[in-house]
Amino acid sequence: MNLPTAFNFKQLALCLLAGYLVSLMPNSLAAEPLHIFVSVVPQKYFAEQVGGDQVKVEPMVQPGFSPETYEPTAQQISALAKAQLYVRVGMPFEDAWMQRIQGVNPNIKVIDARDGVKLRHLEAHSHTEHDTAHEADQGIAHKTEQQTKAEPAAQAVKAEPDPHLWVSPRIAKQMAQQLAEHFSRLRPEQSELFKQNYAQLAAELDQLDQELIELFKDKQNLKFMVFHPAWGYLADAYGLQQIPIEVDGKEPGAKALAAIIAAAQHEQVTMIFVQPQFSQRAAEQVAKAIQGKVVSIDNLAEDYIPNLRKAARLIAGVDRE
């Protein structure tokens, strides 16, 4: 009788162990990080700060590439088939590819970082007339008639919405809050973690905002020249004005370039800011003509806070390269 009893006990123990292991399977699966895709690298920083080890984040636009001309790779489309969330900012490739992305993964949740953001428009300068920018739309103080006539800068016309949201710490904070909310919906058991992580990041962004308020408080209406108009939200937040060299997303022709040089001389510009993802040829031509300098600032760098602080200090003229 002892043998069957021992055998039955062994069977019972194995059954209990198997049941225990099965009960653990959902938790093991839930522990897998959320697979998140974002448009650009700075969003990756926000998502990782908020999500911690609960998220695996991949940017569509890889370091060194321009978001304006980027096209997703076959490997990225394949990886998107397994992702739970896509966070877009409105880059050109997203309009063209979003339907295809959702086609390979009908279950992917797509959210728009622009939700709740007061959008500005990219400056689309003709560089043929005096600068009578659409100041009300851009939040820039109105000029007097005499100032307008005196400025040989380019005339701005309303163009495409500006997708470079993240260059304003205030908007970056909104973007981070949106991420925390959606991460919590996808993984409610970790909502407290996401809330705490967001609070920490928000405090750091508030501190950066205060630094920039102090940095630019005596530099209202400061004009700075850039090749690509990627710093508009920063300019709007702190009372600055960016002057782009690009004409409708392209390098300027000879006539437009001459107008840009005249504008730079009139505004006493000494530095031309460029991004490493774009051609520097036109910027170098302007810099040579005004005896100025080309300075690289990257709004796509991953180390967001120190990078934006560095860029702002260069724009303010506090630091030099």
Image (cartoon, rainbow, N blue to C red):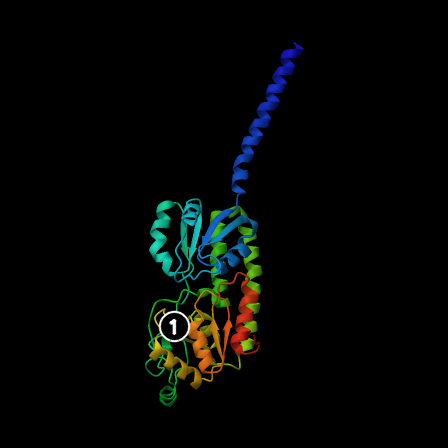
The answer to which of 285 and 33 lies nearer the viewer is 285
Q: Looking at the image, which residue is at 56% across and 35% down?
A: 24
Residue 187: % across, % down: 50, 47
Quadrant location of the N terminus in the rendered image: top right
The answer to which of 275 and 56 lies nearer the viewer is 275
Quadrant location of the C terminus in the rendered image: bottom right
User: Picture quarter containing residue 69?
Assistant: bottom left
The answer to which of 265 and 211 lies nearer the viewer is 265
Label 1 secondary element: loop
- Seen in the picture, residue 107 relative to 308 is either above or below; the reply is above
The residue indicated by pointer 1 is 246
Q: Looking at the image, which residue is at 67% across and 11% down?
A: 2
User: Picture quarter containing residue 160?
Assistant: bottom left
Residue 122: % across, % down: 38, 70
Please indicate, yes or no, whether residue 242 appears anywhere in the rendered image.
no
Assess disc 1: are there few (<14), some (14-19) or many (≥20) residues with their C-alpha within 10 Å of its C-alpha.
Answer: many
The answer to which of 70 and 151 lies nearer the viewer is 70
Please indicate, yes or no, whether residue 138 appears anywhere in the rendered image.
yes
* Residue type for callout 1: Glu
